[in-house]
Amino acid sequence: MSELPWNKRDIIDAVIAAYRPFDRKNVSSWATMVGMEVFMRMALGKPEGRAAPHVEHELWLRIRRVYQALHERRDPNAAYETPIDGEGPLTTDMQLDGAMLQSGRDLRKLLDELDHDLRRARR
């Protein structure tokens, strides 16, 4: 595991604050949307810029674990370090996979623009 610039308590608290019980009609309650909200609040707009991709990936994994634990009414503290089935580290192969590469480029561009805008707004 990489050393994260965010601590466990901050990550868990951020997910708990953003968590809403799943409602098919309310997109903001969907796991991906809650995860993106937490990720953007924690990882973007910092004066020092963005963390390395593998560090942001580790943050994303922990956000997913905590969300899933809340959704399943389990202890988020216990789930924080417990990988979800199919979860793995960010690898070069993942980053270079065709569809993933294009999606990753699009998402990276969007996140970079959002990060830039947030940092500029905080000055």
Image (tube, rainbow, N blue to C red):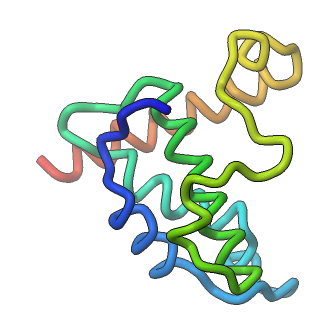
Image point (73%, 33%), residue name: 88
Numbered marks: total:
0
* Residue 92, x across and y down, in percent: 69, 10
Task: Look at the picture and state if 20 lies above or below 1.
Answer: below
Image point (66%, 28%), residue name: 89
Q: Nearer the viewer, residue 51 or 83?
A: 83
- Please indicate whether residue 35 sits to the left or right of residue 46 in the image: right
Q: Nearer the viewer, residue 52 or 115?
A: 52
Quarter of the view holding residue 87: top right
* Residue 114, x across and y down, in percent: 44, 43
Image point (70%, 86%), residue name: 73
Task: Look at the picture and state if 21 lies above or below 101.
Answer: below
- Please indicate whether residue 65 sits to the left or right of residue 46 in the image: right
Task: Look at the picture and state if 67 lies above or below 21.
Answer: above
* Residue 105, x across and y down, in percent: 67, 23
* Residue 70, x across and y down, in percent: 65, 79
| Residue farthest along the left direction in this orientation | 123
Q: Nearer the viewer, residue 45 or 35?
A: 35
Image point (35%, 66%), residue name: 9
